Amino acid sequence: MAKLRITYNAPVVLTFALAAVVVFILEKTVSGSVQWFVAYPALDRTQSYVGMFTHILGHANWQHLIGNFMLILLLGPILEERHGSGSLLIMILITAFITGLANLMFSSGLLMGASGIVFMMILLASMANVRGGEIPLTFIAVAVRWCERCDFASPT
């Protein structure tokens, strides 16, 4: 009988999840740490620039964190295997920057959480079987449903 062993099969996704948990604990225990994990609606301090990328690690509460990472841990390893760790990391960073920039340009509230990354992964997964000149109906349905559920005025 072969031995089963645990493998760190999706390093980008697993490291992202672990980092978010560490940041959540840090935010709850170290005063002032949350300011580094929020995208601000103005570029008036150092944290504003850092937060353009790091807001994906900050979460308002356990439910927010668990909700995001349940989907990220479900879809992420499949996408990381399909596209490669480096490509997925680049996609995560670009998505973080774009969502941070959108918050800067179109919102007056703070932004934190990995919901944009979840959305990116859902869309990427639903486009897995795209053939030339076709858009899967599942892609449209998921995109519309996700946008309906988002509260763009919410600070989280």
Image (cartoon, grey):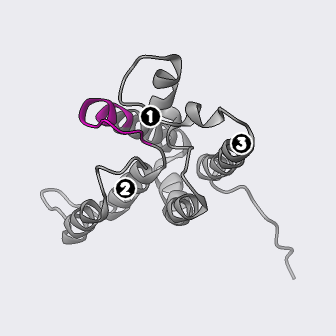
Question: Residue at horizontal 46%, vertical 24%?
Answer: 48
Q: Is residue 28 left or right of residue 55?
A: right
Q: Quadrant of the N terminus?
A: bottom right
Q: Position of residue 16 (x, y in %)?
A: 61, 47
Q: Residues within 10 Å of mark 1 (few under 14, many from 20)?
A: many
Gap in Å between the C-alphas at discs 1 and 3? 17 Å
The residue to which callout 1 is attached is 39
Name the secondary structure under disc 1.
Answer: loop
Residue toward you, 108 or 120? 108
Of badges 1 and 2, nearer the viewer stands: 1
Alpha carbon separation for disc pair 1 and 2: 17 Å
Q: Earlier in the sequence, mark 1 or mark 2?
A: 1
Label 3: how many residues lie within 10 Å, few (<14), some (14-19) or many (20+)? some
Give the residue pinned by disc 2: 119
Q: Position of residue 8 (x, y in %)?
A: 72, 55
Residue occupying the point 30% across, 63% down: 146
Quadrant of residue 111 in the image? Answer: top left
Highlighted magenta segment, given as a residue range = 100-111
Total marks drawn?
A: 3
Look at 24% across and 35% down and name the residue there: 106
> Disc 2 marks which amino acid?
Phe
Could you tell me the amino acid type at mark 1?
Ala
**Which image quarter: residue 122?**
bottom left
Where, by quadrant of the figure, is residue 108 drawn?
top left
What is the three-letter code of the residue carrying label 3?
Answer: Leu
